[in-house]
Image (cartoon, rainbow, N blue to C red):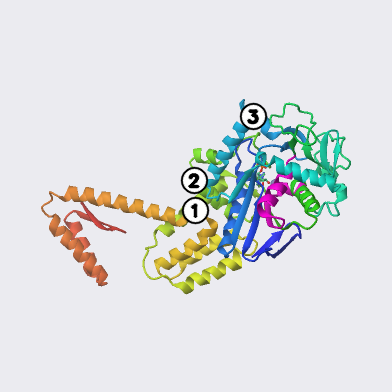
Amino acid sequence: MKLYNTLTKSVVPFVTHTEGRVEMYTCGPTVYHYAHIGNLRTYMMEDVLERYLAFEGNTVNRVMNITDVGHLTSDADTGEDKMLKGAKREHKTVMEIAAFYRDAFFEDCRKLNIKKPDTVVPATACIDDFIRTIEALLDKGFAYIAGGNIYFDTSKVKEYYTLTSHAAEDLKVGVRDDVSEDGNKRNKSDFVLWFTKSKFDDQELKWDSPWGVGYPGWHIECSCISMANQGEYLDLHCGGVDNIFPHHTNEIAQSEAYLGHAWCTHWFHVHHLNDESGKMSKSKGEFLTVSLLESKGYDPLAYRYFCLESHYRKPLTFSYEGLDNAVKAYDKLVNRIASIVPEGEVDAAIVEKYRGEMLKTVGNDLNTAMGITLLYNILKEKVSGNTKRAVIAMIDSVLALSLLDKADAKRAEAEAAARAKAEAEAALHANDPEAEAIEALIRERAEAKKAKNFARADEIRSELLARGIVLTDTAQGTTWARQ
Ligand code: AMP
Ligand code: ZN
C-alpha cells in the first residue's frame, strides 16, 4: 500500500523489514480516565490500518503499551502524574484506577469493533527492562544524572528533530509556556528517563533503581516495550498527531541511541477529533465517551461510520448533527444490504475486480471513504445476491462495520415479524367460511403474476375488494383482511 510517513513527510510505498510480516506498535492509553471519542478515533484508524495490512496478505504483529505510570499532566515532564491525579479524584489506589480504566478502554474498543492488539503490556510490568536500557544509555554517554533524576541528552543525537518540521528554536515555544522549566536540564529539549527526585513526593508507585527509589518517565516505556516484543527493527509506529512531539521524537532519539542504528521506518499519525468548541477534553464541557453516545441512543458503530467517512490525516469536528447524518447513512446501507436475497453462484471475477478496487483506493493512504463508496457500487451491480454478499464481506473485513451481521439480524427480524403476522392472520381467518376460497384466489393471482398475466392478477384483486377483502403484498407473500 501507499501510506503517508511522518518521517519523510510524503506518501510512500509501505515496505517492511521482512516481506509479508508487519511489526506494528501502537501507543496505548493512559488509564487514568475513560477514553474520549477523540482518543478512540485514533485507535479506530489504527485498527483499519491493521485490518488493511492483513487484507493485503501480511501477518501483522501488533504491540501496545498501557501507560499506568510516568505520564505527567504536561508532556514536558512537569505537572503531576496523570495516574495519581486519577487515583486522588476517585479516592482509590493507582492500580485500582489502572485496572478499571484499562477494562473500560477495551470494552469501548469492543463496541467499536477495534481489535485488541496481539500483545498488550502495562508499563509497570517492565520496570527492570527500563532500568537496564537507561543504564546502557548512561554508559554510552547519551544520558546524565542531575538533581537526582536521569535525563536524556538530546544534544548528543545528530537529528533530534527528525520527525517534526519545526526548527529547534520554534520548539522552545512549543513546550508549553504555562509550566515552569526544569533547571536540571542541560538542554531545553532534554527529557526525563527516570525520576528519583520530583516535586511531588506522594507518587504512589516507586521502584528501587541504581539511582535511588523512583519511577520511569513516559517516553522510555514505548521504546522498551516495542524492542522487547518486536526486536531491533520496527516497521510501523502509530499514534495521534499530539504524540509526534515530544513523545515520538524522544522515542526515536533514545531507541536509536541505544541500538546504534535506525529503528522504525514508518510513522503513522491520526489527526485529532475536535468538538465544536475546538479541543476535545476530559475535564471541560461534555465529556464525550462511547457510553455517553449509547445513553443518547446511538449505536457505537454509527460513530465508527462517521469516522470512516473522513480521511485520517484531516482534523475532524464532532457534532451531533454530523453523527445523526452518519446514523441515517449507516442505517440506509444496512437496510439495502438486508434486502439482498442470498442466492446464486458467487462470481469470482467480480470479487477479484473489487479486490483490485480496494487495493487502488483504500490502499492509497488508507482512503476509508472510498471503501464506503465501493459498498454502494457493489449494491448497484447486476450480479447475484451471493456475489454482492461476498464483496461486502471482503470490504467489511477492513472497515469492520458489522454490515452482514446487522443486515442478517434485520432480515431475521422482518421475517419473524411477518411470520407472527401471518400466524395471527391465520388464527383470525380460521373460522372464516370463505378463507379457503379466498386463499385459492390469492394463489391463482400469484401464478398469474409469475406468468406476467397482470390483467388477471388485477382482476382477482378487484374481485376480492368488491367483496370487502383487502390484499397486502409483502416480501414474504400476500396477506388478506376483511375491511
Ligand atoms: P492518551 O490516553 O492521552 O495517551 O491518548 C491516547 C491516544 O489518543 C494517543 O494516541 C493520542 O495521540 C490520541 N489522542 C489524544 N487526543 C486526541 C483527539 N482529540 N483526537 C484523536 N486522537 C487523540
Ligand atoms: Zn508511546
- Name the image quarter holding the N terminus: bottom right
Q: Is residue 450 above or below residue 200?
A: below
Query: Label 3, label 2: how many angstroms apart (C-alpha)?
Result: 31 Å
* Magenta stretch holds residue 238: yes
Q: Are marks 1 and 2 in contact (CB under 8 Å)?
A: yes
Outermost residue toward the bottom in this view: 349
Residue 481 on image: x %, y %: 21, 52
Residue toward you, 205 or 5: 205
Picture disc at residue 330: 1
Look at 27% across and 52% down and name the residue there. Answer: 419
| Residue 149 coordinates in the image, percent (x, y) | 82, 36
Q: Residue at x 24, y 55 (%)?
A: 479
Q: Is residue 60 magenta?
A: no
Residue 98 — which label?
none
- Quarter-of-image position of residue 290: top right
Q: On the picture, is 447 further left or further right than 380?
A: left
Residue at image mark 3: 87
| Labels 3 and 2: the sequence-earlier one | 3
Identify which residue, 227 or 425, lies in the foreground.
227
The number of numbered discs placed on residues in the rendered structure image is: 3
Tell me if mark 1 has few (under 14), some (14-19) or many (20+) residues whose alpha carbon lies within 10 angstroms of its own.
many
Tell me the CA gap for discs 1 and 3.
Answer: 39 Å
Secondary structure under the numbered disc 2 in the rendered image? loop
**Discs 3/2, front:** 3
Residue located beneath label 2 in the image: 299
Residue 124, how many percent across, how many down? 66, 38
Looking at the rendering, the stretch of residues picked out in magenta corresponds to: 217-245
Is residue 49 among the parts visible in the rendering? no
Identify the secondary structure beneath mark 3: helix
**Label whose residue precedes the other's in the sequence (1 or 3):** 3
Q: Earlier in the sequence, mark 1 or mark 2?
A: 2
